[in-house]
Amino acid sequence: MKLLYCPECLDMKKLRMQELRRCACGKAWGYYLDDDLTAEIGGTAVLLAIENDKLREAVQHRPARGRGAVLQTRVLPKSYETLRYRDSPRYPAGSASHAERPYTLTSQTATHAKRIWDYLASFSSPARSDVIVLCCSYDLRICDYACGLLRSGLAPKLVFTGKSGNWTQHLWDRPEAQMFRDRALANGVEASQLLTEEEASNIGENIAFTRKLIPDARTVTFVTKPNTILRVKLTAPLQWPDINAHVACPEFRFPEDVSNVIGVFGVIHEMVGDIQRIVTYPEKGFQVAHEIPEDILESWQHLLKQGFDRHMLA
């Protein structure tokens, strides 16, 4: 979560997507772009960042008395990968493509989103393999899980595949695979156990390009985010039909454990788009057919009606 801070009036505002927000004195302003990640600010604005999971943890451990729980806040540097400066805002005050239909995590919305999350994540089944293939994303925590599988002896090698995608094209200035490899090395994994594929920009390419990299593999466990493993499972038979494919993900809970890179609403948008792709991709030849349960489709329709459509295909 990013907060706009004005050193002149000491006011703070939470940034919103494509909605211009100003401090009390009006000298600091900012907003998120439509990726709900990159911030543009101007005037006297200074950007503060609070990790969502740390905030939830502090709230959960809120003391009954005393001075309260300590919550760490980062003051972002002037040069930062998801921060841009402008002389004037691109959106007028009060405007926002989504501000007219604000997102609210009501209990009903949370219930429908959790139902979809739990369903998409339910296909995890890691197995002894020739190699672990991690389809990279914005969530570096998946690397920690994959490193754990590697250390457990599930496979002798770990491949990172990914250049950039919808969520990471503005996040890092290097391919996803390189970022994940660095994380694995920091986790103590030997460089000799790691391979990278740095050109893929979607799940089909993740699998097809990795197949070219390690064509002799016969049993593969693909690792990715909980809400993405079903799409990987449905794509593998078409892109790499001569392997025994498994998929795996960490046991993250919704909404407690979602990535703070795109947040709860970003994940809901992503899941709604994932369901659409599971429905439509078989006729395009991108995935094998899969019958989605009626209650999952009902939850999908509910979230669509609430405006969670930013990850939908045109």
Image: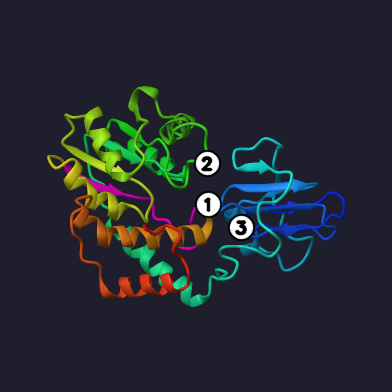
Kindly indicate whether the residue at mark 2 contacts the one at mark 1 (C-beta within 8 angstroms): yes
Q: Position of residue 233 (x, y in %)?
A: 24, 51
Q: Is residue 88 visible?
A: yes
Kindly indicate whether the residue at mark 1 contacts the one at mark 3 (C-beta within 8 angstroms): no
Would residue 243 appear left or right of 138 to someone viewing this image? left
Which badge, 3 or 2, comes first in the chain's sequence?
Answer: 3
Dot in front, 3 or 2: 3
Mark 2 belongs to which amino acid? His
Q: Quadrant of the N terminus?
A: bottom right
Q: Quadrant of the C terminus?
A: bottom left
Mark 3 belongs to which amino acid? Gln
Q: Is residue 253 visible?
A: no
Q: Residues within 10 Å of mark 1 (few under 14, many from 20)?
A: some
The CA distance from mark 3 to mark 2 is: 16 Å
At a point 47% along the width and 77% down the height, the residue shown is 108
Q: Which numbered disc covers residue 170?
A: 2
Q: Residues within 10 Å of mark 3 (few under 14, many from 20)?
A: many
Q: Name the foreground residue: 246 vs 88.
A: 88
Tell me the element at label 3. Answer: loop
Q: Which numbered disc covers residue 35?
A: 1
Mark 1 belongs to which amino acid? Asp
The CA distance from mark 1 to mark 2 is: 9 Å
Q: Which numbered disc covers residue 107?
A: none
Tell me the element at label 2. Answer: loop
Residue extent of the magenta highlight: 244-259
Q: Name the foreground residue: 179 vs 16.
A: 16
Q: Look at the image and say whether residue 263 sits in the magenta stretch.
A: no
